Image (cartoon, rainbow, N blue to C red):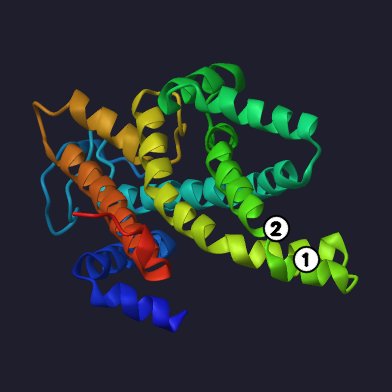
């Protein structure tokens, strides 16, 4: 683990990504301690005010502190991204490994489900699922998880197919090892590397998708703060103040850029063969 972190730190882009990711994660975790105001505290007298000693990054159209709302928006964005990625990873691994070991008819059914989900553009599919499930934090986690399960399922299946016929597994079977033991102690440890890399690069995509849904008004609902809804409100009043757009857009950019650079550096550190050619 420390060796991987050292490799990431030696890369300039990896160093930037790691620092940005830590800033975002720490900001989200410590939001109750760092916030100067409650995120939904209204001060009509200070609406759309510029940065000041009282409101470090200004206020929105209701006089709510943008710095505090941005921090709490970080909690929502990163929390949704981590929850979606973790759940999609687990379900994807289970379905992918099952497809690799299952009889052909079951494998075809699983792959057909993956194909159906993957056939639609991510945002269009998410909007269609929102129409069925409705907006809200829990439903956003569920529907975005559905969208991303095939990504993990396909790579888990491909890696399992590559590994399951390896000679060392044949030797384990000859020694009487059960299928469960082989899967738990040999298959899963050997497929986890590429899946962890995919998970790290999936996080900024989920953050952007959640912000996009909230911007369109079908994502996170008030009173929870979301960068997407902050951007929508900011664009509505951009003629009077640019600070709401700058704050929400800046935090969204920092998070997506940080996680993207960190994910790419992690990919290169775990398997240099996956590094993109210039």
Tell me what residue is drawn at x 41 percent, y 82 percent.
3
Residue picked out by circle 1:
170
Residue 79 position within the rendered picture, expressed as x and y whole percent measured from the top left: 49, 51
Secondary structure under tag 2 reads: loop
Tell me what residue is drawn at x 45 percent, y 30 percent.
219
- Front-most of residues 238 and 183: 183
Residue picked out by circle 2:
165
Q: In terms of image quadrants, where is residue 103?
A: top right
Is there any visible trace of residue 27 in the rendered image?
no
For marks 1 and 2, the one nearer the N-term is: 2
Q: Is residue 230 above or below residue 7?
A: above
Disc 1 vs disc 2: Cβ atoms closer than 8 Å?
A: yes
Q: Residues within 10 Å of mark 1 (few under 14, many from 20)?
A: some
Q: Is residue 58 above or below residue 219?
A: below
- Front-most of residues 168 and 34: 168
Tell me what residue is drawn at x 73 percent, y 35 percent.
107
Side of 166 relative to 129 (left or right): right
Side of 230 relative to 213 (left or right): left
């Amino acid at each position: 683990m420390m060796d991987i972190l050292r490799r990431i730190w030696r890369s300039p882009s990896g160093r930037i990504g790691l620092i940005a990711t830590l800033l975002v994660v720490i900001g989200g975790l410590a939001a109750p301690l760092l916030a100067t105001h409650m995120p939904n505290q209204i001060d009509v007298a200070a609406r759309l005010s510029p940065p000041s000693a009282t409101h470090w990054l200004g206020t929105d159209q209701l006089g709510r502190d943008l710095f505090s709302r941005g921090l709490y928006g970080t909690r929502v964005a990163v929390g949704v991204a981590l929850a979606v990625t973790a759940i999609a990873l687990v379900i994807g691994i289970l379905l992918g490994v099952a497809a690799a070991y299952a009889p052909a008819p079951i494998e075809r059914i699983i792959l057909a489900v993956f194909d159906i989900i993957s056939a639609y553009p991510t945002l269009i599919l998410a909007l269609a699922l929102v129409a069925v499930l409705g907006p809200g934090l829990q439903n956003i986690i569920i529907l975005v998880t559905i969208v991303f399960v095939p990504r993990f399922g396909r790579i888990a299946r491909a890696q399992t197919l590559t590994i399951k016929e390896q000679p060392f597994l044949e030797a384990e079977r000859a020694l009487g090892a059960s299928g469960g033991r082989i899967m738990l102690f040999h298959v899963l440890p050997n497929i986890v590397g590429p899946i962890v890399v995919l998970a790290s690069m999936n996080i900024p995509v989920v953050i952007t998708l959640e912000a996009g849904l909230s911007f369109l008004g079908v994502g996170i609902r008030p009173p929870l703060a979301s960068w997407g809804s902050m951007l929508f409100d900011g664009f509505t009043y951009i003629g009077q103040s640019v600070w709401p757009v700058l704050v929400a857009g800046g935090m969204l950019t920092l998070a997506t850029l940080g996680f993207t650079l960190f994910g790419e550096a992690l990919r290169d550190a775990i398997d240099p063969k996956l590094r993109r050619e210039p």
